[in-house]
Amino acid sequence: MLTYSIENRGGRSLYEYFYECIRKDIVSGALKPGERLPSKRAFAKQNGVSIITVENAYGQLLAEGYLCSRPRSGFYVANIQDRMRESGGGCALDTRSDEDGSVRFDLGARAMPAESFPFATWTRLMRRISADGREELMNPSPANGVLRLREAIAEHLREFRGIEVSAGNIIVGAGTEYLYGLLVSLLGRDRLYAMENPGYSRSERIYASMDAEVVRVPLDDGGVDMAALRASHAEVLHISPAHQFPTGIVMPVSRRYELLAWASGAEGRHIVEDDYDSELRLSGRPIPALFSIDRSERVVYMNTFARSLSPTIRIAYMVLPDGLMRRYWERLGFYSCTVSNFEQYTLSAFIREGYFEKHINRMRARYRAVRDSLSAALRAEMPEGGFGIVGQDSGPHFLLRAGSRHAEPALRERLAACGVRVSFLSDYYAADAMPQPASENVMVVNYSGIAPGQCAELARVIADALKG
């Protein structure tokens, strides 16, 4: 029977403490692959906690791939030991303007309602910095960004993503497109870059615009298909393991170790970890970053404030391992930082003084409310078994599988005629790769710009388009 002393939990919540204890026992081998865990009721009774605490801990371990569940049998330890040994380790959618006003519901744009942005706080911080930090504002920024912002980002990564990193390994830039350009310059245009299929097509176009050759690699239930990756002969892999776009797949820890083993298996291989909306996971803790378990310095971590704060805040950052950071200073240290000092110091204060964490918590609550309202409204409007929702816990978009008598082209037309702008899963496959049959009539529903009060009407409109 698993028993842990809650006297040692420090400031952590109970479920976080039990999650970390069990995960540590799995990683260390104290809990063996295939070993059955106690039932939630038995674990709760043995440790003197509520069943909901155990449910949350087990749920997080299940989401990350440390556990697997068997119907009517319980939870079992997943086999990650072999993968650990092998590895050597312990999207914007279509945002065209609606000039004719025909779009009532835009489920494609990664928008944020104006009332969600903390204008008052941001303005107050900017005024204070303009008044008190004039000398700093006028000093040229280092090529990789002002130190105060990089230190704030490093602390944020340590607290919320489990990444121990020095501020000296962080590069700040005006948007991920700029950072992609730096990466290609560092890693080489002669390398073969792999992207997920289906995946975010803009990233592929950016790499291709820099004369880098790009290949698409198909997915399976755990993320990138390893056999296909090896067969592709790719040297750089760009992935979103915490919340794959657009499928919503959360990569299990066993697959993460497989990828790390692949990266360390040949000279010059690297993984670009795009963590684009990790802060907005709506259930449980954020999934630990691949960067945090990399021991071979093969992972480049990338994130942006465009998703978590505002699409108009064009500030992104990447974390380079030591070897690539040295190469950056040797080859690209003459670059100028592309983000103004005014924005960097304001964002630094916003993070360091706790406003960013509060903002993230508010946005999670808002997105949960919209998700729950929209899901409930769809269930009320749609016939039982006539639809399915996939990936609704990992961020502000989900897949809506529509069992419709219409072919996909006709369904698109019907939705457009009803004023709904939405993309389909088939849109995100490479042009030279046929979409899988299972992707037909699967809508990618991005609800970040939808208000809770719109959900009932939106569900009715979608249901009418599917029924008609």
Image (cartoon, helix red, strand yellow):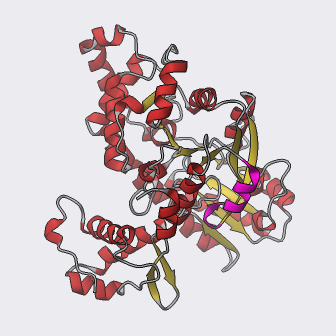
Whether residue 53 is visible: yes
Q: For the N terminus, give its image quadrant.
A: bottom left
Please provide percent x and percent y for residue 455: 56, 58
Measuring from the top left, give residue 275's x and y in whole percent: 51, 46
From the viewer's perspective, tell me whether residue 377 is left or right of residue 159.
right
User: What percent of the width, then of the height, locates residue 414?
Assistant: 81, 57
In the depicted structure, whether residue 47 falls above or below residue 180: below
Residue 438 location, quadrant: bottom right
Q: Residue 192's spot in the image, x, y percent?
A: 72, 40
Residue 123 in view = no
Q: Residue furthest left?
A: 7
Q: Is residue 227 magenta?
A: yes
The answer to whether 151 is drawn above or below residue 430 in the figure is above
Query: Residue 218 in magenta?
Result: no
Count the labels in the image: 0
Which stretch did the figure color magenta? 221-233
- Observer-nearest of 241 and 255: 255
Foreground residue among 276 and 89: 89
Residue 296 against residue 140 in the figure, above or below = below
